[in-house]
């Protein structure tokens, strides 16, 4: 069984609010100084799901793929340290500033290039933009079935047995291989890497594929291929306003308060 | 004038103990003996017609001890080599004398100290007495006559009586008191040892008195009283009017019983905890000569196959050796915060479990190593970490060092526990979820405080110009992760900052450039992560030309001071209390405002017990007019951990109670209005613990740092 884990590196969601800045003119997030990007939380969980299947099925293999900047190597290494076998980085200026759709196009092309893939595991959503689209779009591109927001995945039956989280319950599915699964936090915590594996991962080389390696058309990826247009990026303003009720006596102040609350339709 | 008002005594440290009085009494005896008249002496081997038996017993004993030693040593040798044991020999010899022979630590329990000294000195002196008898009997050297003989009789009896006093105290404690800890792991051998010794001493007196009855009582009435105890016994026996034949019969039989029991008792050394007779002083010699706050560095960590200790043979042989020294006294467990709170760790049982495991699997490992020359990790199917020592046991340790401090035979539990933790974390990656989150946070964000909304510069707001350290200032003020990223600690950081500024100190801070120094990673067992973080920070320090550091936090203090030298980072490190006490002393700070308040003081383990800074914080408190200090019952080197040490700040506790509740209770019991400490972790633990044990908000004790108290005294109450 060969499973591909799609792992995205994102700005640290725990960046203190005071350090989170945006470039309003260019609709971009300014990377916070001294705060390194991290592996998106759900992708660590997807990796855990893949590794448990690998451990339960001798001869299995896990490949981790990330599309992103050179820094995304760190995210790949992290999953390698958890126990994945190989890593592929898709780093090309042409991929930049895309949307979920172009991201999926790039990832799907890489999965096709790998060839012998039986399953793709994604996070339920990337913890920065929270679109939750890429997994489904990869499935679309590859023409594979997809089971999203899974709290459990094992091998069995026709291929995979998946338990999905629904709004008010769970759903058990059987998926034939190959298939795409997006994994949710209900699955459990990702493992803490063992030091021997961290060292082994540090020695592994990550494969680097550019747009040419994937045989993609520059117009179909990145900003050029995006169908989604970001109108405005801004930090919502939070504020409070104080109004002191006038009145000579407490009674008069209370009456003024009631009138005011009624005017606001709170009472 | 700088003397703090009610600081209790330090635990005693002087060498010698109660040898003084005993030697004094003996000297008096000696004086009396040389002034006595006549040529006293006696027939050696009187009535004992089988002196060969003594040598036969002796030979058997020596053989037995040889066998015992070889067997023990074989087990120790399955361990790894122990580096550095032969460095600093003079220091080590001093330790062996002070801690081994003078038994400084035994005396930390006063009753046991007296008891143990009585027994120990009696055995030593009576062995010398016996040796002299043997020399007199079987060597040409003759000296047991004249005044010396009388003196000899006197001190022989004196130390026999001292021994009986010791045995009596031991019997009382074991059988007639509710002294709990000696029954935590009581075994048959414990009864044998103490009853056996009592009988050996008693038969010794009986023997002596029988001889006196026959050879001295009537013949040399002026010699006999020198053996005062046997003399008294002889007078007692005399009442019964036994015939000489009966007394000789009694003498013969007593002799056999005495000699058999004495050698039998010595034989116990080989099979029971009596072996501490030898192992304790040797272990004192092996005791570390560096700071107890320092954990060992794993050299060339990237080249290791196994990280930490997951198999008994991965311990150093010193660590295995010291298991044999344990006497199951329970002192360690009695002071262990985890054990006190009913959590799954008792250092005594941990040591005994390791010892048992070594005895079980050691021989097979020994054989394997002998045959194959390999370490033999696969020899035993019982996992050391997980089966023999449970995960939760290792996690419950606070690395507070209380156990090490109390252990009378100088066992060092903390390195042993941390070694196994290292295996758990680095090799097996079995970590409680919250501790794992802290470690991951260290890796990802360079600090252990997951989810903090603060930045490393947040505390600076409203303080005006905060100097950034650029190498031109004298001191680096190291704020630390807890000092900058945990809301409660910000006032402490600003207090120290304002006091440093007020004192005209030349200092700067690193601000955004601070990263964790690695202490939580090392305490949690991730030595690899620690080394990365430490090396990074040492480089930063060197690049910025840092020479002197003032820290907020005793953990940072300990790491910089004791552990960074392992990575070639040598800095002069002061905890803020040390610096501030100095500034008060030389007048750079003046505590001009009265702060009328009753306080109690909590010694953090990493400042107090592990680094010996007890005075500076108390001096500061004593210099604040109006501040009245009431000590807690457990204080100074006997202080109880707040519960956060050893990475427990980031763990869910398992067990009956939480350690911080226990400690908060002790603080509340003093009736003080605030509990003063010196460590951000302690403060957080009290913030959480005090409300739990004192639910009513009214009149509830408040935790403060020493610096916060001093800030009020320097700038006036509410001056912030
Ligand atoms: C409004 C908006 C603004 C944007 N601004 C920027 C920007 O400033 N800078 C920028 O670089 N990009 C930007 N993007 C692009 C963004 O990175 C892509 O949308 C993203 O790669 C895919 O969407 P998502 O992160 O929401 O993924 P989701 O659909 O939420 O992700 C689901 C799963 O897909 C997988 N996955 C997603 N992305 C990757 C990846 N890159 N590599 C590997 N696996 C992946 C993961 O397993 C993930 O858990 C923006 C997108 C939008 C919609
Ligand atoms: S270091 Fe402290 S917590 Fe750990 S075993 Fe010793 S006394 Fe107990
Ligand atoms: S380890 Fe030391 S303190 Fe603990 S029981 Fe053994 S001898 Fe006593």
Image: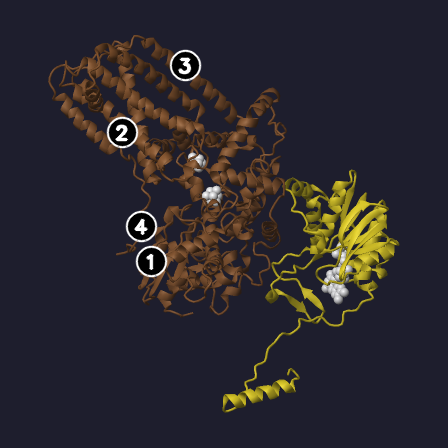
Colour brown maps to chain: B
Name the residue beneath numbered marker 1.
B629
Find chain A in the image and tell me its colour.
yellow
Question: Badge 1 sits on which subunit?
Answer: B
The mark nearer the N terminus, 3 or 2, is 3
Q: Is there one chain holding both mark 1 and mark 2?
A: yes
Q: Is there one chain holding both mark 3 and mark 2?
A: yes
Question: Badge 4 sits on which subunit?
Answer: B
Is residue B172 shown to the viewer in this render? yes
The mark nearer the N terminus, 2 or 4, is 4
Name the residue beneath numbered marker 2.
B162
Separation of residues labelled 3 and 1 (CA atoms): 61 Å
| Closer to the eye: label 1 or 2 | 2
**Residue in view at x 63 percent, y 60 percent:** A14
Name the residue beneath numbered marker 4.
B8
Q: How many marks?
A: 4
Question: Badge 3 sits on which subunit?
Answer: B
Name the residue beneath numbered marker 3.
B60
Image spot of residue B706 (x, y percent): 39, 59
Q: Is there one chain holding both mark 2 and mark 4?
A: yes
**Label 1 crowding class (10 Å Cα cut-off): few <14, some 14-19, many 20+?**
many
């Amino acid at each position: 069984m060969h499973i591909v884990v799609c792992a995205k590196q994102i700005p640290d969601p725990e960046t203190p609010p005071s350090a989170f800045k945006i470039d309003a003119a260019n609709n971009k997030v300014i990377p916070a100084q001294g705060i390194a990007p991290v592996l998106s939380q759900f992708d660590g969980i997807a990796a855990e799901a893949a590794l448990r299947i690998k451990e339960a099925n001798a001869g299995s293999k896990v490949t981790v793929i990330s599309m992103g900047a050179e820094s995304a190597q760190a995210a790949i290494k992290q999953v390698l340290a958890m126990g994945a076998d190989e890593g592929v980085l898709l780093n090309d200026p042409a991929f930049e500033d895309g949307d979920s759709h172009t991201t999926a196009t790039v990832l799907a092309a890489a999965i096709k290039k790998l060839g012998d893939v039986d399953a793709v595991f994604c996070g339920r959503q990337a913890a920065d933009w929270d679109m939750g689209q890429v997994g489904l779009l990869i499935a679309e591109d590859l023409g594979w079935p997809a089971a999203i927001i899974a709290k459990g995945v094992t091998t069995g039956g026709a291929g995979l047995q998946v338990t999905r989280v629904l709004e008010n319950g769970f759903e058990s599915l059987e998926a034939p291989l190959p298939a795409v699964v997006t994994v949710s936090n209900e699955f459990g915590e990702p493992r803490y890497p063992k030091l021997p594996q961290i060292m082994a991962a540090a020695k592994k080389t990550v494969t680097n594929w550019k747009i040419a390696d994937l045989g993609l058309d520059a117009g179909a990826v990145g900003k050029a291929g995006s169908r989604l247009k970001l109108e405005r990026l801004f930090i919502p303003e939070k504020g409070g306003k104080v109004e002191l009720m006038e009145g000579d006596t407490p009674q008069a102040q209370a009456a003024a308060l009631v009138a005011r609350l009624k005017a606001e339709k709170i009472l | 004038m700088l003397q703090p008002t009610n600081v209790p005594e330090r635990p005693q440290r002087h060498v010698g103990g109660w040898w003084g009085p005993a030697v004094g009494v003996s000297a008096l005896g000696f004086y009396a003996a040389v002034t006595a008249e006549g040529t006293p002496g006696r027939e050696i081997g009187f009535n004992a017609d089988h002196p060969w038996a003594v040598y036969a017993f002796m030979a058997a004993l020596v053989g037995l001890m040889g066998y015992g030693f070889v067997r023990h040593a074989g087990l120790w040798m399955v361990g790894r080599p122990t580096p550095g044991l032969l460095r600093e020999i003079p220091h080590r010899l001093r330790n062996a004398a002070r801690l081994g022979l003078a038994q400084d630590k035994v005396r930390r329990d006063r009753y046991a100290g007296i008891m143990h000294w009585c027994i120990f000195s009696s055995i030593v002196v009576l062995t010398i007495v016996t040796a002299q008898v043997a020399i007199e009997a079987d060597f040409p050297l003759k000296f047991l006559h004249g005044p010396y003989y009388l003196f000899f009789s006197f001190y022989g009896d004196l130390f026999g009586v001292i021994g009986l006093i010791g045995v009596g105290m031991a019997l009382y404690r074991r059988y007639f008191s509710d002294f709990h800890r000696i029954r935590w792991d009581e075994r048959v051998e414990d009864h044998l040892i103490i009853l056996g010794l009592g009988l050996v001493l008693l038969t010794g007196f009986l023997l002596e008195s029988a001889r006196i009855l026959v050879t001295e009582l009537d013949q040399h009435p002026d010699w006999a009283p020198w053996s005062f105890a046997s003399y008294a016994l002889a007078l007692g026996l005399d009442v019964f009017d036994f015939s000489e034949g009966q007394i000789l019969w009694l003498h013969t039989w007593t002799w056999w019983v005495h000699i058999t029991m004495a050698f039998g008792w010595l034989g116990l050394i080989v099979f029971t905890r009596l072996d501490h007779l030898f192992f304790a002083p040797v272990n004192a010699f092996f005791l570390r000569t560096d700071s107890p706050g320092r954990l060992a560095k794993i050299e060339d960590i990237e080249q290791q196959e196994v990280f930490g200790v997951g198999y008994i043979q991965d311990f150093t042989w010193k660590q295995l050796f010291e298991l044999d020294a344990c006497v199951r006294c329970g002192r360690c467990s009695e002071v262990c915060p985890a054990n006190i709170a009913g959590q799954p760790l008792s250092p005594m049982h941990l040591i005994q479990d390791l010892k048992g495991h070594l005895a079980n699997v050691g021989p097979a490992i020994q054989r394997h190593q002998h045959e194959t020359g390999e370490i033999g990790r696969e020899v035993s199917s019982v996992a050391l970490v997980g089966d023999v020592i449970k995960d939760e046991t290792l996690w419950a340790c606070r690395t507070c060092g209380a156990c090490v401090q109390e252990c009378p035979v100088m066992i060092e539990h903390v390195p042993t526990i941390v070694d196994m933790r290292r295996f758990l974390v680095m090799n097996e990656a079995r970590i409680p979820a919250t501790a794992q989150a802290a470690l991951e946070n260290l890796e990802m964000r360079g600090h252990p405080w997951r989810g903090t909304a603060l930045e490393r510069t947040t505390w600076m707001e409203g303080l005006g110009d905060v100097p950034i350290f650029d190498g031109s200032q004298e001191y680096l003020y190291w704020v630390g992760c807890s000092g900058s990223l945990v809301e409660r600690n910000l006032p402490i950081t600003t207090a120290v900052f304002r006091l440093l500024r007020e004192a005209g100190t030349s200092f700067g801070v690193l601000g955004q450039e601070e990263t964790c120094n690695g202490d939580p990673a090392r305490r949690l067992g991730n030595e690899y992560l620690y080394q990365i973080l430490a090396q990074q920070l040492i480089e930063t320090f060197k690049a910025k030309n840092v020479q002197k550091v003032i820290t907020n936090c005793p953990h940072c203090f300990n790491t910089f001071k004791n552990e960074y030298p392992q990575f070639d980072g040598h800095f002069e490190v002061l905890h803020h209390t040390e610096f501030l006490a100095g500034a008060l002393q030389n007048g750079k700070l003046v505590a001009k405002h009265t702060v009328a308040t009753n306080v109690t003081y909590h010694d953090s383990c990493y400042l107090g017990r592990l680094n010996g800074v007890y005075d500076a914080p108390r001096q500061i408190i004593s210099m604040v007019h109006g501040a009245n200090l009431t000590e807690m019952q457990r204080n100074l080197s006997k202080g109880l951990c707040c519960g956060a040490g050893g990475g427990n700040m980031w763990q869910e506790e398992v067990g009956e109670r939480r350690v911080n509740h226990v400690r908060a209770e002790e603080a509340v019991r003093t009736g003080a209005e605030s509990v003063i400490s010196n460590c951000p972790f302690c403060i957080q633990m009290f913030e959480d613990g005090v409300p739990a044990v004192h639910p009513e908000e009214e009149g509830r004790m408040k935790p403060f740092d020493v610096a916060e108290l001093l800030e009020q005294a320097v700038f006036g109450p509410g001056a912030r």
